[in-house]
Amino acid sequence: MTGAASGGRDRAVLLDVDGTLVDTSYLHAVTWWEALRQAGHVVPMARVHRAVGLGTEQLLDRLLGEERDKDRDTALSDAHSALYAAYWPSLQPLPGAARLLRACAERGWTVVLATSAKQEELQVLRKVLDADDAIADAVNADDVDTAKPAPDLVEQALAKAGVPAGRAVFVGDTPWDVEAAHRSGVRCVGVLTGGVSRAELLEAGADEVYQDPAELAARLDASALGPAEG
């Protein structure tokens, strides 16, 4: 199934995956912490968690500074990827994730995933979600030059969906998601499953914030993702 071409739908819901649909935020925090520790960088895990959701370069800028030896970035990223891959067999969807995707599709929304994960990891995440029947398309880190909070992923997802920014809503769990959506002209709905507070998501500009995908699915018709017009 590919975008709006899959049925003439003219509204799209674009969704982050890590921390929004699959319970991975703290796994990314601990594996980035360990990758940094192995390379001799002692960074408190709380700081690492606050950077989760950024692209690798931006995450390392935030944690190690822009004056670091960037020639070592690839080794750090590879170490994180290897450590994180050990958790793939035990990954779990967040409450209501598949139900949310299917409820959106049933109400006439084109469902597109927009994730900073690479293609191989996205395949794992989609298996965990087990909701491909509701997903029209997906965009991943391999499809863009710059990760969130740059707008590239959201803009690519809009192109996949075949809708303008004003006909889309983004769902995410971090201020970086909100920023990327707003830079693309897209409204953003937040969820608390990534460990970022309601106040922070609202301050970043989220239109609405829900506890998890299950609460959003239960309140869908009264949310920004109410029944599609037409």
Image: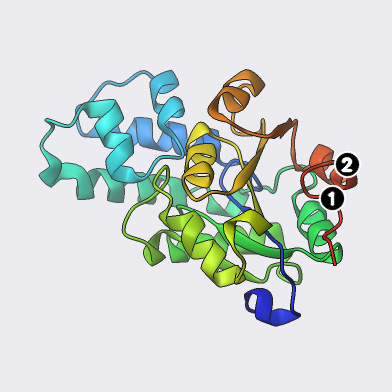
Question: 207 or 44, which is in the foreground?
Answer: 207
Residue contact between numbered discs 1 and 2, judged by CB atoms under 8 Å: yes
Instruction: Name the residue at 71% across, 80% down.
Output: 6
Residue 226 disc label = 1
Element under label 2? helix
In the image, is residue 171 above or below residue 43?
below
Relative horizontal placement of residue 109, taking residue 149 as reference (left or right): right
Relative horizontal placement of residue 224, taking residue 24 as reference (left or right): right
Residue 35 disc label = none
In the image, is residue 48 above or below residue 11?
above
Instruction: Name the residue at 54% across, 34% down.
Output: 174
User: How dense is the environment of label 2, judged by Cα within 10 Å: few (below 14), some, or many (20 and up)?
Assistant: few
In the image, is residue 135 above or below residue 208?
below
Which three-letter amino acid code belongs to the residue tagged 1? Gly
Disc 1 and disc 2: Cα gap in Å?
A: 6 Å
Q: Position of residue 95 (x, y in %)?
A: 77, 42
Instruction: Name the residue at 81% across, 66% down.
Output: 108
In this rendering, does residue 88 appear at all?
A: yes
Q: Which residue is mark 2?
A: 222
Quadrant of residue 101 within the rendered picture: bottom right
Which three-letter amino acid code belongs to the residue tagged 2? Ala
Question: 170 or 17, which is in the foreground?
Answer: 170
Question: 39 or 227, which is in the foreground?
Answer: 227
Question: 187 or 160, which is in the foreground?
Answer: 187
Element under label 1? loop
